Amino acid sequence: ADGGVATAPWQVLRTCARTGPERVVWEGLRRNQLKGRVREDLFARYFRDFTDPTVGLRARMTWFFMNWFATPIGEIDNDYLMMAHQYDTVWAGALGNYRTLALHMFNDPALRASLDQLTEVECGTVPVENFAREYFERFTVGLEAHNEGDVKRLAKALMNCPEDVETPNLDLTTPGLIFADVNETVWTLTEAEQRAVVDRVLDFRLAPAEPPAAAQFMCAKLYAELAVPPEAAGPLSLALQPRAVVDCAEHFYAHGYEMRAALEFILKDREHFKEQLGRKLRWPVELIYGPWADFNLSLTQASGKTWTGNVGQRPFEPPDVSGFDLDTVWTLDRVSKAHEFLTTWAVRREPHSWVEKAHFANITAARAALAPYQVPGASDLYSFATAICDLDLFVDQEGAVGAHLLNITCLFDSSCTSIADAHRTQTQRWRVWRANIDLTLTNVCQFLS
């Protein structure tokens, strides 16, 4: 009204339309509540999926790809909605077509965000190379099948800008192995352009007679994950892969990059898979999910978070964008925690059910039930240690020498004082046997035999 800025119609309208402080607080609380619900739902689905025996292979391959496309939740500001989208994508594609999954992950918001490639970069600035570099090095072809020219050209393509930065980049004038034409302008704006880039990477061969480098890279990773990797001996491919990996890659590519084809090839490999069963180093978290599923353990979601965290592999928390390394993931503390989980939840609870309370109603029934655990050469002595270790290696605790040996006569004879009053009821006698199990499972003898 007075011609000043404060009374100008546009300023009055902006002031009236401004969100009030109460609404700002409310919106913040609502967002946090939504994020909390998404987080809890994601963990619930994750633990349900990974402990369901009917989808074991899909869960195993989901773990593989979540570690392949490692995205620490902290790197994306704890955005569990974004992480839930990534988990759904990987779960759906884990046993599907790798070409399709690679395209989805090329555009995955969480993966892009963790590598500083989610938001558009202003044209005329230096391209961000993180995503492009990792896409070649970790996600598709490996170190041997790309160079700096490829990295720089893909980084520029992700900007979708027609011009270069003011300062010429020598790597943009250096032919790449995959993007070899220095005069080509690569775009990634439309889905067709994105698919063309991904297909070009996945179809690239270092030599016409060899399968694509991406197929070799995937098979090498699968061998390391599921079997014993073939030795790098004899003639190697230009991607530095041994014959078994190259054969797998040829089979994989010939079947259109179907993941089931690659898995079938490796699981039928007698030398590197079938004959190596029981000798393969496993992830710490497998000692949590395996017994959880096999024994249908009644762990809560909170317990799942705690125990997977105890062994250093809580869901969605890889150490960095490189993921977990099987050669370094096992620490003494994690071994201890895995052992604690097994003795507390899995191994201990299962053996407790092998001999029932009713078996201790009389000495005849008890002898029959405990027959598998009889100490050789001692008709009255029984020990659960006979099932899991060499008795000569049992390490006695101070002041409790021979505590792992149960004299069954004393267990039922009221005049025997070595087990105090444990003989009075079948429940008490059954508890003595359970204590024998617990004592044995916490002894180091099982690691020495």
Image: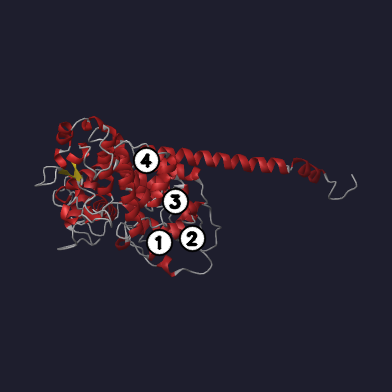
Q: What whole-number distance in Å separates the C-alpha atoms at marks 1 and 2?
A: 10 Å
Mark in front: 3 vs 1: 3
Task: Check disc 3: other Cα within 10 Å, few if <14, some if 14-19, many if 20+.
Answer: many
Tell me which colouring the rendered structure shows: secondary structure
Is there any visible trace of residue 112 in the rendered image? yes
At label 2, the amino acid type is Val
Looking at the picture, tell me which residue is in the foreground, 432 or 90.
432
Q: Earlier in the sequence, mark 2 or mark 4?
A: 4
Q: Is residue 364 left or right of residue 176?
A: left
Q: What whole-number distance in Å separates the C-alpha atoms at marks 4 and 1?
A: 29 Å
Residue labelled with disc 3: 111
At label 1, the amino acid type is Val
Residue labelled with disc 4: 91
Q: Write the residue at 54% across / 42% down.
A: 35
Percent of width and height locating residue 137: 35, 59
Mark in front: 4 vs 3: 4
Q: Earlier in the sequence, mark 1 or mark 2?
A: 2
Q: Quadrant of the N terminus?
A: top right
Give the numbered dot on residue 120: none
Percent of width and height locating residue 264: 21, 43
Helix, strand or loop at label 2? It is loop
At label 3, the amino acid type is Leu
Residue labelled with disc 1: 151
Percent of width and height locating residue 443: 26, 53
Helix, strand or loop at label 1? It is helix
Mark in front: 4 vs 1: 4
